[in-house]
């Protein structure tokens, strides 16, 4: 265990940025999001969660995959570069760090997504414990410990010091680059803060919520449940919940014709959109209820059934705060509980 004075953090950031591209929660006007560090930016560790997740650093909202052109009878295809410079994301909360493990299940399983794989290999995650969890948080329902984030490096801000604990080989390599700025210490202060965080979480509105299905065999019962008729009625299909979600992974592939070549792009998409998975005969999910059901069945039923109980939600609470209709995953879980499909 190491520590460094908060007053020394600008020097720490400068040292890291000399060898890695460094991203931090940066405040711009009244909004804090992960952005590239420079000496003049306003680093904001006071905000619990950034407005958007750091997912875009591994899965960009828009990225070019390849270009294709025709010269005479010759077709030329040029793949986008897979080279990725090492980078550090500093200040990631436990929920967002865990969300990358869920994305790994999708993008690193066969066939491996080489673009995502290159960024994951290059990225170093420095997580920050949540000393002030907020009412919308429910990460503990999914077994995530906000006091002990799982990442390459775990950190804790306590009074005037940042405590630092490398957890992986990449974390140790980063630590070696800054070791002369760190002071060796024990974990007594960290243990006290962890206990305080656990106490604060126990007092949150959703602290007692857990999600458990008695059997994976009730899939059709959940799918055909009447709860989807009632709970989807207020949804306006704005897709806000999917674009701020750290674990949503849907995308579309599209072409752009410049006249001389074709650019193939991947861009984020949403299962809540009426034209998502559009095929020649139309959309297989024609109604809002069907699209709504697909989103939450995937997160709460399909994904855990197919991935050893791993839910596709990390309880970050962004959708709780952002849904304009007040219709978020907590409400769906509660309705599933009322209908007997999950137990809390």
Image (cartoon, rainbow, N blue to C red):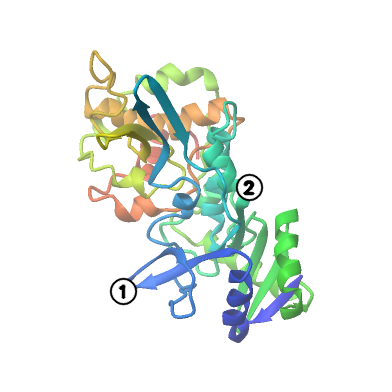
Residue neighbourhood size for the residue with mark 1, other residues' Cα within 10 Å, grouped as few (<14), some (14–19), many (≥20): few
**Which of 190/284 is in front?**
284
Residue picked out by circle 2: 121
Residue in the foreground of this view, choosing between 123 and 314: 123
| Residue 138 point in image, percent of width and height | 48, 52
* Left or right, residue 251 beside residue 186: left
Question: Relative to 180, does residue 147 appear above or below in the rendering?
Answer: above
Residue at screen point 54% across, 26% down = 305
Distance from disc 1 to disc 2, alpha carbons, whole Å, reads 33 Å
Labels 1 and 2 touching (C-beta < 8 A): no
> Image quadrant for the N terminus?
bottom right
Q: Mark 1 or mark 2: name the one nearer the start of the chain.
A: 1
SS for tag 1? loop
Residue 175 position in % (x across, y down):
73, 67
- The local secondary structure at tag 2 comes to helix
- Circle 2 crowding by C-alpha within 10 Å: few under 14, some 14–19, many from 20: some
User: In the depicted view, which residue is nearer to us: 159 or 10?
Assistant: 10
Say the numbered circle drawn on residue 29: 1
Q: Residue 193 location in percent, x, y?
A: 64, 71
Q: Residue at x 72, y 69 (%)?
A: 177
The count of marks equals 2
Indicate which disc residue 313 carries.
Answer: none
Q: Is residue 220 above or below residue 274?
A: above
Residue sitting at x 73%, y 78%: 182
Left-right relation of 163 to 96: right
**Residue located 44% across and 54% down the image:** 53
Residue lying at the far front of the rendered structure: 72
Is any part of residue 51 visible from this angle? yes
Is residue 191 among what the camera can see?
Answer: no
Q: Quadrant of residue 233?
A: top left
């Amino acid at each position: 265990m190491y520590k460094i004075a908060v007053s020394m953090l600008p020097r720490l950031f400068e040292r890291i940025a000399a060898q890695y591209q460094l991203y931090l929660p940066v405040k711009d006007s009244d909004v804090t999001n992960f952005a590239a560090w420079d000496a003049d930016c306003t680093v904001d560790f006071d905000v619990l969660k950034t407005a958007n997740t750091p997912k875009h650093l591994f899965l960009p909202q828009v990225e070019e995959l390849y270009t294709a052109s025709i010269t005479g009878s010759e077709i030329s295809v040029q793949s986008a570069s897979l080279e990725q410079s090492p980078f550090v994301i500093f200040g990631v909360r436990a929920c967002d760090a865990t969300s990358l493990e869920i994305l790994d299940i999708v993008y690193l399983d066969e066939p491996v997504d080489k673009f995502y794989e290159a960024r994951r290999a290059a990225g170093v995650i420095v997580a920050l414990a949540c000393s002030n969890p907020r009412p919308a948080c429910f990460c503990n329902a999914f077994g995530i410990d906000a006091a002990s984030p799982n990442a390459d490096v775990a950190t804790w801000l306590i009074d005037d010091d940042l405590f630092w604990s490398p957890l992986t080989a990449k974390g140790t390599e980063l630590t070696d680059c800054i070791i002369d700025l760190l002071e060796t210490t024990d974990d007594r202060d960290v243990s006290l803060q962890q206990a305080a965080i656990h106490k604060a979480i126990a007092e949150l509105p959703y602290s007692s919520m857990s999600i458990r299905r008695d059997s994976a065999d009730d899939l059709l019962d959940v799918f055909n449940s009447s709860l989807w008729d009632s709970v989807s009625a207020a949804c306006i299909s704005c897709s806000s919940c999917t674009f701020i979600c750290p674990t949503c992974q849907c995308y579309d592939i599209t072409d752009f014709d410049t006249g001389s070549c074709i650019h193939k792009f991947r861009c984020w998409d949403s299962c809540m959109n009426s034209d998502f998975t559009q095929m020649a005969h139309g959309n297989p999910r024609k109604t809002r209820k069907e699209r709504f059901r697909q989103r939450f069945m995937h997160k709460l039923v399909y994904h855990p059934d197919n991935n050893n109980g791993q839910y596709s939600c990390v309880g970050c609470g962004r959708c709780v705060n952002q849904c304009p209709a007040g219709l978020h995953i907590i409400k769906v879980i509660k309705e599933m509980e009322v209908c007997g499909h999950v137990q809390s």
